Amino acid sequence: MQMDTFQTPVVMIVFNRPRTTRIVFDAIAKIRPAKFLVIADGPRANKPGEDELCLQVREIVKTFDWPCELLTNFSHGNLGCQERVISGLDWAFSLVEEAIILEDDCLPDASFFPYCAELLGRYRGDSRVAYVSGCNLVQQYTNTDDSYYFSQIGGIWGWATWRSEWQRYDRHLIGWLKLRNERKLAEIFDQPKAVASWARIFDLMYENKGPDTWDYQWLYTNLKNNSLVIVPSVNLISNLGFGEDATHTTIEDARFMLPAAKMEFPLKHPSSFIPSRSLDRRRVQDMFSQPLFQRLSIKLHRFARRCFI
């Protein structure tokens, strides 16, 4: 008996890692998305052999064997993390109204997909919610009977959002200087160290002196708009990307290398939209427990980067 296809579009962002790409692709293949969009960066001219790795990755994502509309956005040259992800998601959301997004090192539990699909439907058109996250890096501190909670910083190791929210993306941190001078971050974060650290990060991104990334700007967009992020009560994503071949997570850190767990259904929904500031506070404490520039060099870029992510 043939399985039905999964109707929510799935976007996969890939680059030069055949091993992790294959593992994540196989997880996506199990749910058989009817529409599968792939964003790929091109090889760097100064990296011998990378062209072959990029080619291997692109061949992997073409090996689907289910009824599927495959849409690809492959860059001939290397655009870098920031430009590739931004231009890629702009392309994806020009074609679909909503999507689940996975990078090539974010391995989801199978329950991640129906969890995202249900919440995309439930909060569609609700401008209070920016996106649905699949990762919970403070799972050990999460004590709730609900299936998820609301956060102000979220996490993008596996996430889902709508075209309407992505269109609010503020790449250039418009208005940052005014917000900084009005000390607005102190209204969000109650730890002076966190306020100073985030201000420094946003300063660097505003001045185009920060790392080649896109997710600090996504965090800024959502903080500026007072948006909420849905975070699962259990971690649904295992990050495979720590190691020497990673762009940012070159140093292993057990706090962020959590296994993926299973979400139980039916989902239990929170009774309010009040964000869990105690869990956000714990996330921030973990994020800023290392010197700032050390964090920027390892992919706490994906946690301090992404840890709004």
Image (cartoon, grey):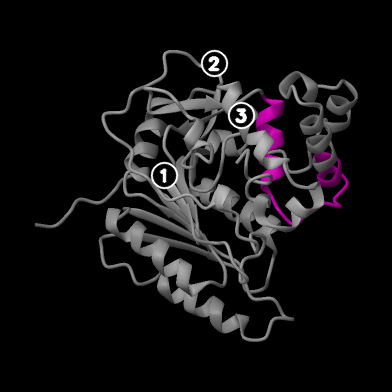
- Badge 1: few (under 14), some or many (20 or more) residues near its Cα, within 10 Å? many
The residue under label 1 is 236
Q: Residue furthest left?
A: 1
Residue 283 relative to residue 39: left or right: right
Residue tagged by mark 3?
Answer: 280
Residue with the most extreme right position: 181
Tell me what residue is drawn at x 56 percent, y 20 percent: 275
Q: Amino acid at mark 2?
A: Ile
Task: First in sequence, mark 1 or 3: give its number.
Answer: 1
The alpha-carbon separation of the residues under discs 1 and 3 comes to 18 Å
Q: For this rendering, which residue is in front, 258 or 162? A: 258
Mark found first going from the N terminus, 1 or 2: 1
Answer with the quarter of the image where residue 64 lies: bottom left
Label 1 – label 2 distance at C-alpha: 22 Å
Q: Which residues are magenta?
A: 202-225
Which x, y percent locates residue 122? Answer: 38, 26
Q: Relative to 45, say whether 270 is above or below.
A: above
Q: Nearer the viewer, mark 2 or mark 3?
A: 3
What whole-number distance in Å separates the C-alpha atoms at marks 2 and 3? 12 Å
The amino acid type found where label 3 is placed reads Asp
Residue underneath mark 2: 274
Q: Quadrant of residue 63?
A: bottom left
Residue at 84% from the left image edge and 33% from the top image edge: 196
Q: Observer-nearest residue: 201 or 121?
A: 201
